[in-house]
Amino acid sequence: LEYLAALERDGRGSVELLRDLGVAYERLGDVQGATIEANLGEREQALASYRRSLALREELVRRAPTIEHRLALLRMQVVLGEWLLSADTADEARGLLEAAVRDADAALAAGVDDAQRRTVAAAYMTYGWSEWVGGRTDGGIARIEQALALHERIAAADPTNRTARRDVAVAVGRLGLVHMSGTGRLEEALRHYRRSFELLDALVREVPDDAELARSRTFARLVVGKLLMQLG
């Protein structure tokens, strides 16, 4: 941390250093307390690092508003928004993610490639999830469906892209969960979970050693069974 702070002091005015420091603070936050990765459990330190990364990227965009820098900021908005949701600070998360969605809309309008489109989809997905958490189910579904459409476009462009196909499966499963727990439309939930299972099953057959994929497939299968029982 002292090293990064010293770099900030010594390199003020450098766009390149702002970019590199934003990445460094994000990675530090991941090590300290990421939401889904192995970490040191230093949650408050992680929050401070993520906030610093966000501030640096905001400054970077003010100085050099390229599409790459704007998408780096968008990525950090999503990372911090997810962290805040996991910490039950939904109001702050929503404000940040609303800004992320505005930036995502602007990025799409400006034109993005598939890798950049995935970042935009992440913003829609996370904001949709925050809307559902906040009881705004219809708005949440609409944003998750936007994310799904982008992921489907990426996967259709390259059917060998397993990451893109996994993204589709995750988005479909998320819609299933929102319908199951939010709208009560169990038939719709079943439709989504069945599709998610089929997508995951195909991926597991291609990569049988991927434990995370296997766990996700098992979960989807269990939910399908539960929904069939509920529907009789």
Image: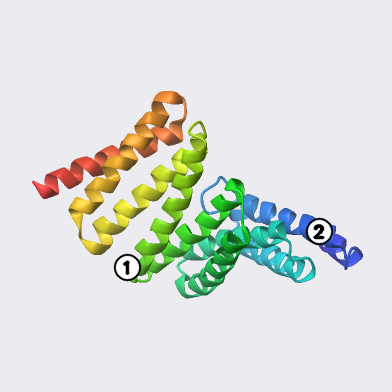
Residue 31 spot, x, y in % from top left: 64, 50
46 with respect to 90 (left or right): right
At 27% from the left and 41% from the top, the residue drawn is 194
Q: Of the residues shown, which amino acid type is indicated by label 2?
A: Leu
Q: Of the residues shown, which amino acid type is indicated by label 1?
A: Asp
Residue 127 spot, x, y in % from top left: 46, 64
Q: Give the label on residue 180, or none.
A: none
- Disc 2 crowd rating (10 Å Cα; few below 14, some 14-19, many 20+) is few
At 79% from the left and 69% from the top, the residue drawn is 63
Residue 222 spot, x, y in % from top left: 25, 40
At 47% from the left and 75% from the top, the residue drawn is 91
Mark 2 or mark 1, which is nearer the start of the sequence? 2
Q: Which residue is mark 1?
A: 138
Q: Which residue is mark 2?
A: 4
Separation of residues labelled 1 and 2 (CA atoms): 43 Å
Is residue 139 placed above or below 230 in the rendered structure? below
Q: Quadrant of the N terminus?
A: bottom right
23 with respect to 115 (left or right): right
155 with respect to 188 (left or right): right
> How many discs mark residues in the rendered view?
2
Residue 221 spot, x, y in % from top left: 27, 37
**Can see residue 215?**
yes
